[in-house]
Image (cartoon, rainbow, N blue to C red):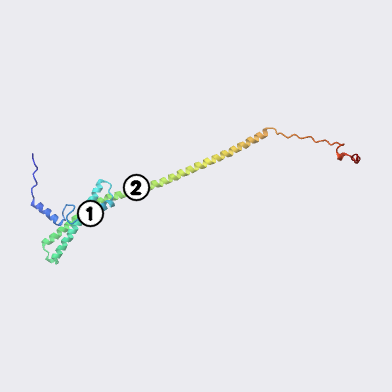
Amino acid sequence: MSTAAAPAFNPSTAQTRLNSLKHGATSKQLFIPGEDPSAFLSMLQENFRYYKPVTEQQAALVEDATIAHWHLARVQRVHNENEFDHYTAKPEVSDWTNQDMDRLNKFDRYKTQAERSLQRALANVLAFHKDNVRTRQWQQLHELRQQKFEIQRERFELAKAREARLAAKSQKTEASVANKADSEIRFAKNAFSSPQKTAPTEPKPTANAATDPKSQTPEEMIQ
């Protein structure tokens, strides 16, 4: 059974790793001694809340931008500490050696590289963020237009229902008037077509001269 050979020890690589961990400016590790992981997680959460990625690729870009920001803060901190140490040890710039200048320039390059990395990462994030904002604005505008048309549709339906009720009421009224007119016409026709019955009259009594006092003479009345 064959076994894989262990990687050969490289003193220069080991020294580079030790130097990177010593000041942290070139360390690829996410956290180094002296850093608070909770601060990084808070920054990551805030970036996710602000940029609102909607795909895995966009989420990865937000993570890259957060790491670049975190790394720039680290390099800036190390850069400030390095300058402070140099100015404290040698307040006069004329006392600085070429080695001192090289060290300061090296940390300046570290800072410039970290700033460019953050700029590239933010450019990628801002690109999709603008697209997402435009998409959300379009969706909101589309929803507002849908609500507007829905309100107009409801008003149209209400007006149509009101017209239908008025039409039904008008038809009912017209039908009632027509029925009443038909009844009156039928009643009039029946009244003209049937003979009128009159009540019989009693014959008037004829006046009798013998019994009617007005027709009697005074002599007859005395008798």
**Residue at x 67% of width, y 34% of height:** 192
Task: Judge the density around disc 1: few (<14), some (14-19), many (≥20) Cα neighbours within 10 Å.
Answer: few
- Between label 2 and label 1, give the one nearer the viewer: 1
Say which mark, if any, is on residue 139: 2
Report the amino acid beneath label 2. Answer: Gln
* Helix, strand or loop status at disc 1: helix
Q: Amino acid at mark 1?
A: Ser
Q: Secondary structure at mark 2?
A: helix
Looking at this view, is 95 or 201 the one in front? 201
Q: Residue tagged by mark 1?
A: 38
How crowded is the residue under tag 2: few (<14 C-alpha within 10 Å), some, or many (20+)?
few
Q: How far apart are the two marked residues, 2 and 1, measured between alpha carbons?
A: 35 Å
Q: Residue at x 48, y 42 (%)?
A: 161
Q: Is residue 166 above or below residue 64?
A: above
Quadrant placement of the N terminus: top left
Quadrant where the C terminus is found in the figure: top right
Q: Which residue is drawn at the image coordinates 54% and 41% (left, top)?
A: 170
In the rendered view, does 67 fall on the left or right side of 90? right
